[in-house]
Image (cartoon, rainbow, N blue to C red):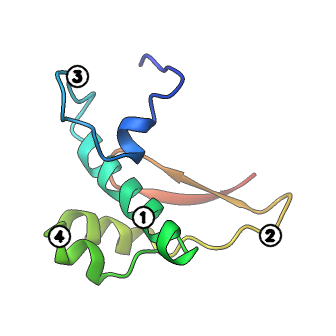
Amino acid sequence: MLRCHSGELYYTAGTLGQDAKAFCDAGDLLLSQTTVDAWGSFARTFDPNPSAAYPAARGYATTANALKKAGPWNAVGGHGSPLRLLDGRGLARTTAM
């Protein structure tokens, strides 16, 4: 997979799929939607865990299910705190740094 600086902006800005650039795989849209939901929630409330009603109100049942399955994004407390990893299959997991 080709990686480039600023490539994450398509995902965080929710603009993936709005130009001629093709999706890399079937998980791209879900990854973008969950990323936008987490960033949007963080911008509004300083908490990256969106209300379950937020994606549901937009008709994003798949996103709501992925966020529910992933569980809450816990606060980071400093060195050695868990790191949240996201992937395009709608999975999020926490791992030690």
Residue 59 x, y percent position in the rendering: 13, 69
Residue 20 x, y percent position in the rendering: 17, 21
Which structural element holds mark 1?
A: helix
Can you say whether 78 is above or below 2 in the image?
below
Can you say whether 44 is above or below 29 in the image?
below
Q: Which mark is residue 21?
A: 3
Inter-mark Cα distance, 2 to 1: 22 Å
Which structural element holds mark 4?
A: loop
Q: Where does label 2 land, which residue? A: 77
The three-letter amino acid code for the residue at tag 1 is Gly
Q: Where does label 1 land, which residue? A: 40
Residue 81 x, y percent position in the rendering: 77, 63
When asked about the image quadrant of residue 95, the answer is bottom right
In the image, what residue occupies the spot 80% across and 69% down?
77
In the image, what residue occupies the spot 18% across and 27% down?
19
Which sits earlier in the primary sequence, circle 3 or circle 4? 3
Can you say whether 86 is above or below 72 in the image?
above
**Badge 2 vs badge 4, beta-carbon distance below 8 Å:** no
Judge left or right: residue 33 versus residue 74: left
Query: In the current view of this chain or complex, which residue is farthest to the front?
Result: 44
Q: Where does label 4 land, which residue? A: 58
In the image, what residue occupies the spot 54% across and 23% down?
5
Which sits earlier in the primary sequence, circle 3 or circle 2? 3
Residue 90 x, y percent position in the rendering: 34, 55
The three-letter amino acid code for the residue at tag 2 is Gly
